[in-house]
Amino acid sequence: DGGITQSPKYLFRKEGQNVTLSCEQNLNHDAMYWYRQDPGQGLRLIYYSQIVNDFQKGDIAEGYSVSREKKESFPLTVTSAQKNPTAFYLCASSAQRFSGANVLTFGAGSRLTVL
Amino acid sequence: SQELEQSPQSLIVQEGKNLTINCTSSKTLYGLYWYKQKYGEGLIFLMMLQKGGEEKSHEKITAKLDEKKQQSSLHITASQPSHAGIYLCGAEHGSSNTGKLIFGQGTTLQVKP
């Protein structure tokens, strides 16, 4: 079955360490997205990529980095520069047909806790 | 203030009762998407609305997009415990086709048996 796989499901990090969250999709989708979810704040866009080797900052990109070397993969690195990294991170992808018809398919999420 | 406001923020209903969740945008909507989330899990797509006045139904859930395309409602008829979760609306505010969605803060629904 096609879908999006995020790993790890739970991750603990000490302050000052970088961590990388994995996101892999086998849906043959062109576009991929990273969102952060905090209690009571809905989802906020970190980075997105519409095509391989290209990506754009979202609303809260500071302290994060991404790469898109393969169509199937869009890893997110949470750097030590991110001041409040404890959150639930969601990866999504879409076929990006046209505006108003972009259904995003989400992974199961990764919960990062900074100790 | 949020570009996409949901109300209410939380809701507790008795099983069998009807309920409505609203999603109001500060800008014209080019696409409005409803998702459901169980706590600690990913989002599951429910419905997509594109045209003003459009209405879609799936089982006991109906979503509408108003004529002016700045508000949507999600209505659940005869609620069941399986309807419990967090409902989020997501929207495209432009026609540039980046595919990125802005989300409301979510509505947490509890259904009491």
Image (spheres, coloured by chain):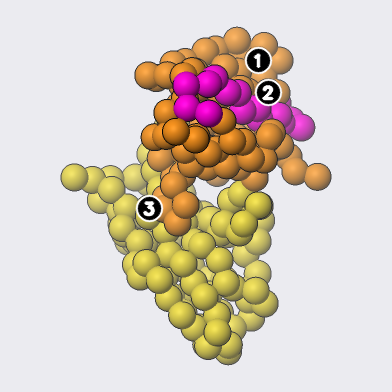
Chain identifier of the residue bearing label 2 in the image: B
Q: Amino acid at mark 2?
A: Gln
Q: Which residue is mark 2?
A: B71
- Give the x, y percent position of residue A72: 30, 56
Give how far across and how far down residue A90 sits, in percent: 47, 56
Verify CB contact (< 8 Å) between mark 2 and mark 3.
no
Range of the magenta residues?
B14-29
Q: Please determine whether, in this image, residue A20 is positioned above or below residue A61.
A: below
Would residue A30 appear left or right of A41 to someone viewing this image?
A: left
Give me the C-alpha separation between circle 2 and circle 3: 27 Å
- From the image, state the color of chain A: yellow
* Chain letter for mark 1: B
Q: Quadrant of the N terminus of chain B?
A: top right
Dot 3 corresponds to which residue? A107
Q: Nearer the viewer, residue A88 or A92?
A: A88
**In percent of the image, x 43 and y 76: which residue is there?**
A11
Q: Amino acid at mark 1?
A: Asp
- Residue B4's tag is none
Q: Are marks 1 and 2 in contact (CB under 8 Å)?
A: yes
> Do labels 3 and 1 touch, CB within 8 Å?
no
Is disc 1 placed on a helix, strand or loop?
A: loop
Which chain does orange denote in the image?
Answer: B
| Residue with the most extreme left position | A1
Q: Is residue B34 left or right of residue A81?
A: left
- Label 1, on which residue? B66
Q: Residues within 10 Å of mark 3 (few under 14, many from 20)?
A: many
Indicate the position of residue A35 as horizontal and vertical percent values: 53, 56
Residue A53's quadrant in the figure? bottom left
